[in-house]
Amino acid sequence: MTYILFDIGGTKIRMGVSGDLKTLDKSESFNTPQEFDKGIEQMVATVKKLTNDKVTAIAGGIRGPLNEEKTGITNDSLIPKWAGKSVVDALKKHYKVEIFLENDSAIAGLGEAVYGAGKGLDVVAFHTISSGVGGVKIEDGEIDMASVGFEPGHQILDIDRTVLGDDITPTLENLVSGTAVAERFGMKAYEIPQSDVVWDELAEYLAQGLRNTIMYWSPDVIVLGGSMITGDPRIEIDAIRKYTVAVLDGFVPTPHITMAELGEEAGLYGAMGILKKRL
C-alpha cells in the first residue's frame, strides 16, 4: 500500500508517503507556487520522487476556508489564485483513487490527536498560534462535524477595546498572533526578548480564549502549536496553564494543556489519520 499525504500552506507545500498509516516513511517540502496549475504540477512531480509504487489513496490539507464539497478553498489572502479551483479534481486527473481534503489547521490537530500530544484521549482541542490563530475539535480520532469549519481565532475577547482600541477588531487572533504582535509593537515577535512582560500578557490573553474553548468543547486536553508557542521566544505553556486556571476560577476543572509534538509534519500525520479512519 502507498498512501500520499500533503499539506498546502501559504509559504510551503509538504508532502509525504506512508505504507502502513502508522509511520511517515518519507517527506519533502517546496515553496508554494502562486499559480494553481504550477502547484499541482509540482505536487505530482514530488509524488514521483517519493515513490515508484502505485498510489492507494491520497489525503491532505490546505489553508483557507473549504468549499461545501471539500474539494478546494473559497478564498485566501496568501494563495488567492488557488481559490475557486478544485485540488481534488486536479489530482484525480493523475490518480484514479480516493482523495480527501480538509483545512490545514484541522489536519494538524488531527495529527496531534492521533499520533502526537493528544494520543489516547477522546476529545482533543487543538489551537495553532502563529501568523494567525486556528483550531479544531477532534473527537474519537475524527475532525468534529461542522457546517463551515472552526474559527476560534475570530472570537471576540477585548469587548471594551481597552487593548486594541477602536480601529482593530478585538479578536483572539488580533491579540496573540505573530502578525498582530508585530503590528502592535512595531517589531517581529521573535525580536522581543523572552524576559519582556509582553509574553506574560500574551499568555493571559490566550488563557481567556482557552476558557471559551473549555466551556464550549469540554476537551480532555488542549494541544497548542504554532511558532508563537513552539518558537524561541514564545508564549510559555506554564504561564498559559496558570492564567487558564485563574480565569476558570474552579467553575470547571482545567484540562491538561500541552505543547504540540509533531512540528511541521503534523499535517502529514493528520492526513494519515484521515485515511486510517475513512478507508
Image: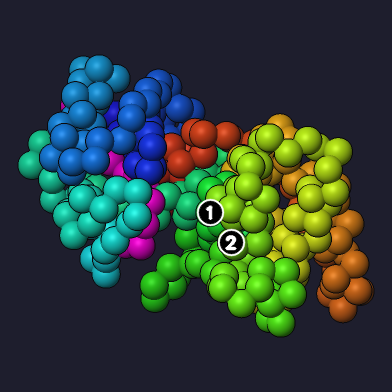
Instruction: Say above or below: 182 vs 18.
Output: below
Q: Single out the residue that lies furthest toward the bottom.
A: 160
Horizontal placement of 69 versus 61: left or right? Answer: left
Could one spot residue 226 in this view of the protein? Answer: yes
Residue for point 43% across, 68% down: 149
Residue 69 at x, y = what percent? 23, 65
Q: Quick one: label 2, few (<14), some, or many (20+) residues within 10 Å?
A: many
Residue highlighted by disc 2: 173
Which x, y percent locates residue 205?
Answer: 75, 63
- Element assignment for label 1: loop
Q: Measuring 49% from the left and 67% from the top, which residue is drawn there?
A: 150
Q: Is residue 206 magenta-colored?
A: no
Looking at the rendered structure, which numbered label has been put on residue 2?
A: none
In front: 65, or 146? 65
Q: Is residue 260 visible?
A: no
Mark 1: which amino acid?
Gly
* Residue at (39% x, 76% y) in the render: 147
Say which residue appears at 79% left-offset and 48% top-offset. 199
**116, above or below 138, in the image:** above
Q: Amino acid at mark 2?
A: Glu
Q: Is residue 100 above or below residue 138?
A: above
What is the residue that sits farthest to the left in this orientation? 93
Give the quadrant of the N terminus: top left
- Of mark 1 and mark 2, the one earlier in the sequence is 1
- Residue 54 included in the magenta stretch of the image: yes
Q: Quadrant of residue 122?
A: bottom right
Task: Identify the magenta region.
Answer: 53-66
**Nearer-the-camera pick, 257 or 273:** 257
| Disc ID at residue 132 | 1
Proximity of marks 1 and 2: CB atoms separated by less than 8 Å: yes
How far apart are labels 1 and 2 at the CA level? 6 Å
